[in-house]
Image (cartoon, rainbow, N blue to C red):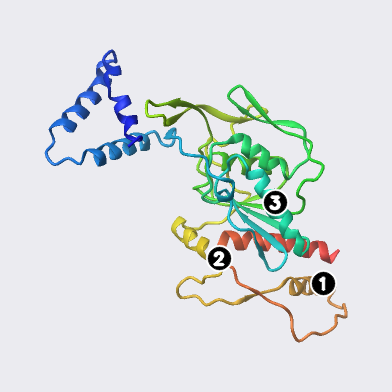
Amino acid sequence: MAILVLLTTFAGSGWAKSPPEMRLFDEIYHVIRTNLTGLDLEQFEKEAIRGLLRHTHGNAELVRKRKPAHELTETFKVFDESYGYLRIRFVEAGLAEAIRVLVEGSKADGDLSGLMLDLRFASGWDYQAAVSAANEFMNKDRSQLLVGELHLRTVPNPNPIEGPITVLVNSETSGAAEVLAALLRRNDVGLIIGNKTAAKTKVFSEFELSSGSKIRVAVGEVRFDDGQTVSEKGLTPDISVDVELDKEREFFADAYAAPKGRKARNRMSEAQLVRNLKLRLNPDLKLEKTTEMPTDREVFDPVLARALDLLKGLRTIGSSR
């Protein structure tokens, strides 16, 4: 019921001194609320609130409870025995520590050859959390963001997470998640792969309602330390991969699930890639014959597959030198 206070706050007696065009909303709301036969009042008010907020295009929203640390990320995975994959759900306080714990924990089974940070469908408005998360991958003492009058900075990190990194994004990557992706690219930590992001990086002010709940309203733009806007039109990926949003949601459930009409097949393994590259560079090279080469299952998620291929390519080039 607390959510209902938002609309009644906007349409209450406090509008008595408002301009005529604002009072019109108050009058229409009151007439419908008190006279429409069979009206489900609670549902009516909820829908009115949703419509009101929807027409702000993300520039106003109710403040929800902060997510606990264990809900900020999904379980850490390793693809093809060497490439780490971490899906981030919310960029909020505690994310930096969660990333550190999961990545360090994965090294118990051996060093990783690369890391994929998946920010598709990720959101959040805690820009300090975005800077702190980015700080896990860099050792830089410098101002990174301007959030209103506040300078957010990274600090010296003697033990940053190292290695090739790819950052996966899509049109649902918004807010602090967009900022995290932008910071990782801007500081030469990783490449961005996927589709253009949501372009929702605003500075918000919070207002408390009489129910005790809060609403946040956009009052400015988030900018880099040099004054450049972070994401006025969305972040354009370094490597674009065209995929429908509905399909991408399906791939989230199982990256190995083959779409209808296609059969799963084995992908060329890293050992095969290295062997083929060596022969291409030196056709006369004598390589020991082998009848069995390890192969990897095909990843059908096109964005994840592109990121994985990039990391494999980087390792293959390094192995051939």
The x, y position of residue 298, in whole percent, is 60, 71
In this view, the mark in front (3 or 1)? 3
Relative placement, left or right, of 247 versus 179 is left
Say whether marks 3 and 1 touch (CB < 8 Å).
Answer: no
Circle 2: is it few (<14), some (14-19), or many (20+) Cα within 10 Å?
Answer: some
Q: Give the residue at x 35% y 35%.
A: 3
Query: Circle 2 — which element?
Result: loop
Q: Give the residue at x 68% y 45%.
A: 97
Q: Is the C terminus in the top left, top right, bottom left or bottom right quadrant?
A: bottom right
The amino acid type of the residue labelled 1 equals Lys
The amino acid type of the residue labelled 2 equals Ala
Say whether marks 2 and 3 touch (CB < 8 Å).
Answer: no
Judge whether residue 113 can be spotted in this image: no
The amino acid type of the residue labelled 3 equals Val
Relative placement, left or right, of 161 versus 205 is right
* Quadrant of residue 129 within the rendered picture: top right
In this view, the mark in front (1 or 2)? 2
Sequence order check: which comes first, mark 2 or mark 3? 3
Q: Which label belongs to residue 255?
A: 2
Q: Nearer the viewer, residue 191 or 150?
A: 150
Q: Nearer the viewer, residue 217 or 165?
A: 217
Q: Is the N terminus in the top left, top right, bottom left or bottom right quadrant?
A: top left
Q: Which label belongs to residue 101?
A: 3
Q: Which label belongs to residue 5?
A: none
The x, y position of residue 175, in whole percent, is 53, 39
In this figure, which residue is indicated by the disc labeled 1? 278
Q: CA distance from mark 1 to mark 2?
A: 30 Å
Query: Circle 1 — which element?
Result: helix
Relative placement, left or right, of 237 versus 14 is right
Sequence order check: which comes first, mark 1 or mark 2? 2
